[in-house]
Amino acid sequence: MSRIDEVFASLQSRGQTAFMPFLAAGDPDVSTTVELIRLLAGCGVDLIEIGFPYSDPIADGPVIQEAYTRALGKKVRLQDIFAGLAALKGEKLPPLLAMVAYAIVYRADPHKFAAAARQAGFSGLIVPDLPGDQAAELFAIARAHELDLIQLVAPTTTPDRVERILKSSSGFVYCIAVAGTTGVREALPHELKTELETLRKKTKLPLAVGFGIGRAEQIDSLRGLADGVIVGSAVVRHVGRLSAAGASRATVLDELTRFTKELTAAAHKEQVGH
């Protein structure tokens, strides 16, 4: 079992949902990203998704796009991220997942990128702009380096494509809650329940829902339907305030800690009747 498999198996045995926050690497700088990983780990999160800044993200909404723009404006490079994470070696952390554009992976060479990601402490890769049903080669490379390759399934993904995508998936399936880009929504779509139930029949992999989630009550609504929840824009919005003029770093970090603990607690409520 991979580290990601172990996390989901442990939580499922207790009737709990995995909580997975997202950070944009290098926003406001790499050293702060390292500090934030430690902060989130201390809040009891189960996995941490690290976004690699890219100028043309495929599905990120304005909050994450702005975070990437800030990082790129400071000339954050791939090697800076890997080198920064080296400071965490040997620390007790949840599995780290790299959310990275395939253009970055391809330019670095997929074999070299996978090796560097593993060396930096990553447990899995999420490559949103590589069509899932064309990912067999990268899947094999990832597995050779003991990395899971997490695939995305959207509400618009056709049943035959879902079948092909699942053949190159491991760790968990990233279930996109809404068609469109990332960002907190007022409510999750009613069709999501049916989509998750249908997907559950097709795979034994855990199902983690992302896009649109940012409140404890939304996590509550997914209990028993999803094995994990991914929260991106709501976390990145807190972090973005570290770059704002006049923002108190201590206050921002305290607020992020409270927010993270609230959502982690919501995810870790045991399922009734478990």
Image: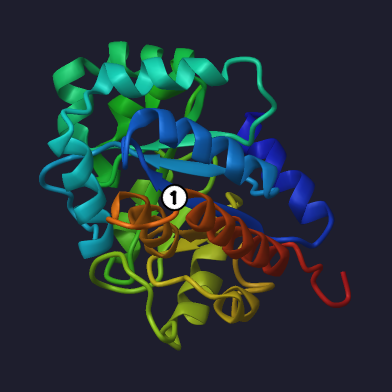
In the rendered structure, the answer to whether residue 41 lies left or right of residue 76 reads right
* Residue 232 seen by the camera: yes
- Residue 102 quadrant: top left
Q: Does 71 sit above or below residue 200?
A: above
- Furthest toward the right, the residue is 273
Residue nearer the viewer, 176 or 82: 82
Question: In the rendering, at what x and y percent does residue 133 appear?
Answer: 28, 44
Q: Residue at x 68, y 42 (%)?
A: 42
Is 202 situated left or right of 105 in this image? right
Neighbourhood count class around disc 1 (C-alpha, 10 Å): few under 14, some 14–19, many 20 upward: many
- The count of marks equals 1
Residue ranking furthest to the front:
246
Q: Amino acid at mark 1?
A: Phe
Q: Tell me if residue 45 comes above or below residue 126 in the rendering.
A: below
Residue 36 percent across, percent down from the top left: 51, 40
Q: How is the image coloured?
A: rainbow
One can see residue 61 in this view: no
Looking at this view, is 145 or 252 the one in front?
252
Q: Quadrant of residue 257?
A: bottom right
| Residue at (31% x, 27% y) in the render | 138
Identified at 24% across, 66% down, the residue is 181
Foreground of the two, 43 or 209 = 43
Q: Quadrant of residue 2?
A: top right
Q: Is residue 55 left or right of residue 101?
A: left
Q: Indicate the quadrant containing the C terminus: top left, top right, bottom left or bottom right.
A: bottom right
Q: Where does the image place residue 171, in percent across and percent down from the top left?
A: 54, 40
Q: Which residue is mark 1?
A: 22
Q: Quadrant of the N terminus?
A: top right
Secondary element at image label 1: strand
Q: Is 212 above or below relative to 191? A: above
Residue 229: give x, y in percent of width and height.
55, 61
